[in-house]
């Protein structure tokens, strides 16, 4: 007998999850074609819009060294990376589940995260410590916080470039401007896709084309009218196409359709983060240093505990909280004591802000805000700050307000040192949480728990991974874990 023909796998999408699926399928000898809706410049889904950070379980620095592009960097020996156990990762996810137990998908994410990172590194996808955003210098050392330590070299753009290079080395091909418009079925099995009038046959199809965050009508349907005004942080092409195709074939709705990853974003940003900018800079419309100051709504009131936890654990919720405020905006207010600690996105060339030497003059420039109420709110906040506790941005420092109905639980400092800065923000949506149910090999399931033959899914289209929020860096890891699983499943003979 001759050698059996390798399986052909069509993958819809070219983001991190799609590329990981392609890598896994190619490893198994499959012929892989990735189909990208956009042209080459806008390929990569949401991946290019990210900062490239990936959360995974590790026991210590020895687990990180094999993943690093430059393990001999002298900063590595001068860093405290700590550890991030599977137990801690699971605990962090459960903290966003609103009382739900850990889902099967979350269990897979936690327990496969470390192995998946090592697998990516074996394909030349390398990482570097996130010195600028996830560590602060303390006693001459880089102290990492929040369980998130590594990002892809050159952030999300770099992750995409490295994964695509690995796919192409193994013989995978990408077709651009190839929007999939339907799934081809025969005898109850998915056996290809339609690209307009073209029929592309395949032994298996993997949907890795994102959620429905760029579809205003679906956002309103599943999430409510507030979400029509949300800025779309990522690609304009994630309009739920793959999700709708799968549902038409009887796939089960799964996960929290009303939930999403939301982020404070520049109020005056263009839709989709200004596609005229290089991909690596589009993420700079995000504004997530609120924990170093206060956020005020149109009524001049604070509405969240800005210091409830490390921003890794709050920013995906606080973007949604801003959309619930009057006018769906807020202002982030800082003084000069923390200005140098703000992330680089606050000094982005297209950042919108106001600045004044006196706090009252700043508040007068904060358009749409009740100035008198804002002045009173900040005065009460300043008076409530515990001045005995030392400010420490590397830890949950307990430097809190005392006696306020809505506390600031950590990093509370009096706003008293000019010049003062205020940034107008709104809620931006990154990806949606509701999607499809998949089995342990990535097959798409029906309500009855049966698999749709030949159809697999991974990435943001998979439901059940996140609920009321998520610890930062989990999204890319989820795409890699479930992408690898789908690629392996789809390529089995």
Image (cartoon, rainbow, N blue to C red):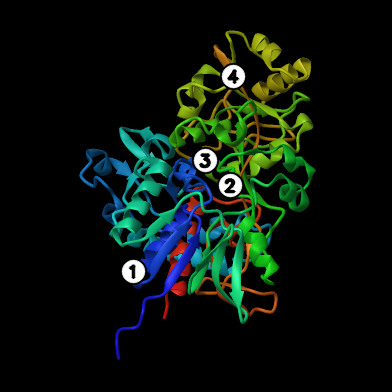
Q: Which mark is residue 484?
A: none
The location of residue 324, given as percent across then percent down, is 75, 38
Circle 4: element type: loop
Q: Nearer the viewer, residue 227 or 77?
A: 227
Q: Is residue 280 visible?
A: yes
The residue tagged 2 is 237
Distance (Cα) linking label 4 and label 2: 29 Å
In the displayed structure, would residue 421 be above or below residue 32? Answer: above
Report which residue position mark 3 lands on: 396
Q: Secondary structure at mark 1?
A: helix
The disc, 2 or 1, on the residue closer to the chain's N-terminal end is 1
Q: Which mark is residue 27?
A: 1
Residue beneath disc 4: 353
Image-based side of 143 in relation to 333, left or right: left
Frontmost of labels 4 and 3 is 4
Quick one: quadrant of the C terminus? bottom left
Q: Residues within 10 Å of mark 4 (few under 14, many from 20)?
A: many
* Kind of element beneath mark 2: loop
Mark 1: few/some/many CA within 10 Å (<14, 14-19, 20+) = some
- Foreground: 226 or 186? 186
Whichever of labels 4 and 1 marks the residue nearer the N terminus, that label is 1
Where is residue 250 drawn, in percent x and y?
A: 69, 72
User: Do tag 4 and tag 1 residues touch (Cβ < 8 Å)?
Assistant: no
Left or right of 435? Residue 286 is: left
């Amino acid at each position: 007998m001759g050698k059996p023909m390798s399986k052909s796998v069509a993958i819809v999408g070219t983001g991190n999850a799609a590329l990981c699926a392609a890598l896994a399928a190619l490893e198994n000898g499959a012929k892989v074609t990735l189909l990208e809706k956009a042209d080459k410049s806008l390929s990569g889904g949401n991946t290019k819009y990210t900062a490239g950070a990936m959360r995974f379980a590790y026991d210590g620095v020895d687990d990180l060294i094999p993943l690093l592009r430059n393990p001999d960097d002298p900063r590595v020996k001068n860093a405290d990376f700590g550890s991030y156990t599977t137990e801690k990762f699971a605990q962090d996810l459960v903290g966003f589940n609103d009382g739900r137990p850990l889902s099967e998908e979350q269990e897979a994410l936690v327990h496969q995260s470390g192995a998946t990172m090592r697998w990516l590194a074996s394909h030349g996808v390398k990482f570097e410590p996130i010195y600028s955003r996830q560590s602060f210098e303390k006693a001459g050392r880089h102290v990492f916080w929040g369980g998130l330590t590594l990002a892809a070299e050159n952030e999300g753009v770099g992750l995409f470039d490295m994964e695509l290079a690995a796919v192409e080395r193994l013989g995978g091909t990408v077709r651009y401007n190839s929007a999939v418009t339907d799934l081809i079925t025969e005898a109850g099995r998915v056996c290809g896709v339609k690209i307009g009038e073209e029929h592309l046959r395949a032994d298996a199809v993997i949907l890795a084309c994102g959620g429905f965050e760029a579809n205003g009508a679906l956002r309103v349907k599943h999430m409510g009218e507030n979400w029509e005004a949300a800025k779309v942080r990522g690609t304009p092409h994630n309009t739920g196409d793959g999700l709708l195709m799968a549902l038409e074939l009887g796939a089960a709705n799964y996960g929290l359709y009303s939930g999403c990853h939301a982020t404070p974003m520049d109020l005056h940003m263009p839709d989709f983060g200004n596609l005229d900018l290089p991909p690596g800079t589009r993420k700079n419309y995000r504004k997530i240093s609120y924990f170093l100051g206060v956020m005020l709504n149109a009524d001049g009131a604070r509405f969240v505990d800005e210091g409830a936890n490390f921003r890794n654990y709050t920013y995906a919720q606080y973007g949604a909280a801003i959309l619930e405020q009057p006018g769906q905006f807020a202002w982030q207010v800082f003084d000069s004591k923390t200005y140098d600690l703000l992330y680089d996105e606050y000094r982005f060339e297209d950042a919108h802000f106001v600045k004044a030497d006196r706090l009252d003059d700043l508040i007068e420039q904060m358009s749409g805000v009740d100035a008198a109420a804002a002045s009173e709110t900040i005065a009460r906040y300043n008076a409530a700050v515990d001045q005995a506790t030392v400010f420490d941005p590397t830890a949950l420092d307990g430097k809190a307000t005392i006696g306020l109905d809505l506390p600031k639980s950590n990093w509370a400092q009096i706003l008293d040192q000019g010049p003062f800065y205020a940034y107008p923000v709104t809620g931006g949506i990154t990806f949606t949480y509701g999607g499809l149910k998949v089995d342990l090999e990535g097959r798409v399931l029906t309500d009855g728990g049966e698999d749709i033959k030949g159809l697999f899914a991974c990435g943001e289209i998979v439901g059940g991974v996140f609920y009321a929020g998520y610890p930062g860096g989990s999204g890319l890891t989820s795409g890699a874990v479930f992408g690898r699983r789908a690629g392996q499943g789809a390529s089995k003979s």
